[in-house]
Amino acid sequence: MEKKEDINMKYAFINAKVYDFNQFREDQYVIFDESILEVGNMSEFIDENYEIIDCKDHLVLPSFVVGHTHIYSTFARGMSVPFHPTNFQEILDQLWWKMDRHLDNEMNYYSGIVSATDFMKNGVTSVIDHHASGKDIKGSLEMLKKAVTKDAGLRGLFCFETSDRFDVDACIKENLSFIENNHSNVARGLFGMHASLSLSEETLRKISKVIKNHPIHIHVAESLMDQEDSLKKYNERVIERLDRHGLLNEDSIITHALYVNDEELDIIKKRKCVIALNVNSNMNNSVGLPEYIRFKEKGIPVIIGNDGISSSITSEYLTLYYSMHLKDGSPLEFGLGDLLDIINNTYDYVNRNLGAKLGRVEVGYNGDLLTIPYIAPTALNEGNALGHLFFGLFNSFKPNNVFCRGVKVVGDYKIRNELTKKYREAKKYADKLWENIKKEDA
């Protein structure tokens, strides 16, 4: 499958069952290029020399978005380092901070290629990334943009994790430069910050002077240690501290929020921020689980990410649903309706901040779509379509065709040869990274 075959084509899905987390429709056709041009009943379909894809025994869905990820974590796959953590800070020290300080722009680029390729194979075409690379701060976000949006053909919101571990001025400049130079519905920037525990008062003052109204993207209370650090050093909780510095701009992403109190939630709500959940990562790091019901009761929009732990988002949907049942001690408190709200909130967030129209199979929405084989063994209708996806497909979600911006990025389960070649080249840069880490440990 070569990209040049897809440019400027108009596609037509025919004989399709369409579900977009809003409506379910049978016996449909969908005509699209960069945008969806027509949707209707097959009885009204007229072929005007479209590239036809017969979707009999398939579902057509909008492609997925990931509300928080770490593309740079790609090269941690299979890496062996001395690792004996007893708390969350030691997980950072012994693994993630050891790794990210050795990343340069070549590694950033190839981690972007690998991550984007794996995402598209899982039906994900838009990502919100939280990046860190100590060797190369300058130009790192443009390098990720090149890999993810230009060469792989996806969409992304990018930011750099400002932290006192790095050159703070360089971090600030990288965030602002990317924000100011990217205004398309393909790539835009947020203002990245790591977490309160790695941000001094001087750093927060510097950021507050230049951030204007740009949303921040930050880890908050991922572990109890973040709150303990803030209370000990500043005699206030993390959200209170960020708010004192005027950093909680509208649409800021508060990632994790496992240990926030009601007063902090009131601030998050007042400032019109969103909370990003990443439950697989939370369990992997043994830090706890979010109290979704409290967020819901406060009326705070919740989105969902994967924290870089995998290339799937449907696995996050599953884990969130099951883990909330366990945490709440009830199978009734968190239902598929709650999951539906979170999925749609994530589309809505990306639409607002990327200037896109994703998440619906309707005229005027972007041609970011997928098809997946599915023969329903039981009745399938609007009232149970999400249940069919959740219990029938999400555990092993492998679409056969994936489109982003009207371009086929996955065709019959295959990706472009050029992208496969770059994917193979990535190992060379991972080897270099691992070698540099070994030298540090020696």
Image (cartoon, grey):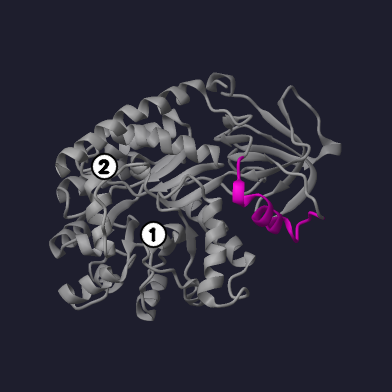
Q: Which residue is mark 2?
A: 177
The local secondary structure at tag 1 comes to strand
- The residue at 35%/57% (across/down) is 215
| Nearest to viewer (mark 2 / mark 1) | 1
- Which three-letter amino acid code belongs to the residue tagged 2? Ser
Q: What amino acid type should be assigned to the residue bearing mark 1?
A: Ile
Residue at the image point whose x is 60% and y is 51% from the top: 395
Q: Which mark is residue 278?
A: none
The answer to which image quadrant residue 266 occupies is bottom left
The mark that comes first in sequence, 2 or 1, is 2
Q: What range is drawn magenta here?
A: 379-398
- Mark 1 and mark 2 in contact (Cβ < 8 Å)? no
- Foreground: 138 or 109? 109
Q: CA distance from mark 2 to mark 1?
A: 20 Å
Q: Residue beneath label 1, please?
A: 253
Image coordinates of residue 308 in percent, x first then y, are 40, 49
Q: Is residue 261 magenta?
A: no
